Image: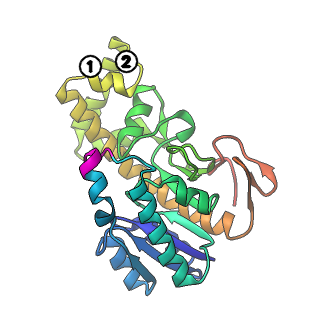
Amino acid sequence: MTIVCFVSGSGTNYREIVAGNANHDYIVFTNRPGCGGVSIARSNKHEVIELSHIPYLKDARKRYGSGNIPRNCPERVEYEQALCALIENKIGREPDLVCLAGYDQWLSDFIVGRYYPRILNIHPGDTTKGYTGLHWVPSAKAIIAGDEVVRSSLFFVDKGEDTGPVLVQSAPVNILQTIEKLALEGRQELLEGFHKIASYVTIRGIGNYEDFQQKAGQELFEMMELICRNLQEALKVAGDWKIYPFAVHHLIARGRVQIDGSTVYVDDREMPEYGYRMELCKK
């Protein structure tokens, strides 16, 4: 297959995909020239395409403000048209698969419509439970909901926000056990903080992340962030770095995946909403 990995930072997801099977034609696209993922790509002798988004979104940033640029504004579409042209001119056709491997730009309907269902993205939370948000927020939502575990979700990107049909979910990472292990390694404050947060959420009847964000004091909120950042690191290793290569090489590359609209099939079996769960299925 010709696989294009979109990276904006360290490129570790791309690194793990390649480690799973180097015998594909890989291209790395980045919107941040010179990022860590580019260094990995060059050491792998993979083609690199660099196109900064900053000049394209300059006027939109002035008009809407930084962080408020609409997903489908003309400037985003123009940028994606340019990057698609670069990729397709390089390989002479559309890619077989696009893996968002730590890509920090919101995709517009243009590129989704062009490549669906060939765009994969990884999310550090259970998207079927609505645990959306960036970075550590999905883990915070799981804690507030009283979940015992967190999972990574790998999904086909559609025109919603982390709403695409899930292909694979990782094996569960136990929240309390992970924090207890960190406490044994000298991070006792994380375990104490976790119990304080759990008690606060129960006593105050906190129902969701937004409620917690509004009502919790700064100290408790910062502790939640610290705990969840550590959970996300554990989930990256046990979740993201396992299910991305598995999905690409053991499912998609072997022709085991079909998708009809938003319904996913693996080995001709319709998958449940949460997709192919690692602990429930065998290769």
Position in image of residue 27 (x %, y %): 49, 78
Which structural element holds mark 1? helix
Q: Is residue 59 left or right of residue 103?
A: left
Which of these two is toward me, 263 or 231?
A: 263
Quadrant hosting residue 248: bottom right
Residue depicted at 69% across the width and 51% down the height: 281
**Quadrant where the image shows the N terminus:** bottom right
The local crowd at label 2, few if under 14, some if 14 to 19, many if 20 or more residues have their Cα within 10 Å, is some
The residue where tag 1 is placed is: 215
Looking at the image, residue 151 lies above or below residue 34: above
The residue where tag 2 is placed is: 206
Badge 1 vs badge 2, beta-carbon distance below 8 Å: yes
Looking at the image, residue 147 lies above or below residue 47: above
Which color scheme did the rendering employ for the protein?
Answer: rainbow
- Magenta range is 62-68
Residue 112 in view of the camera: yes
Q: Is residue 38 left or right of residue 16?
A: left
Q: Is residue 41 magenta?
A: no
The numbered disc on residue 188 is none
Which of these two is toward me, 231 or 222?
A: 222
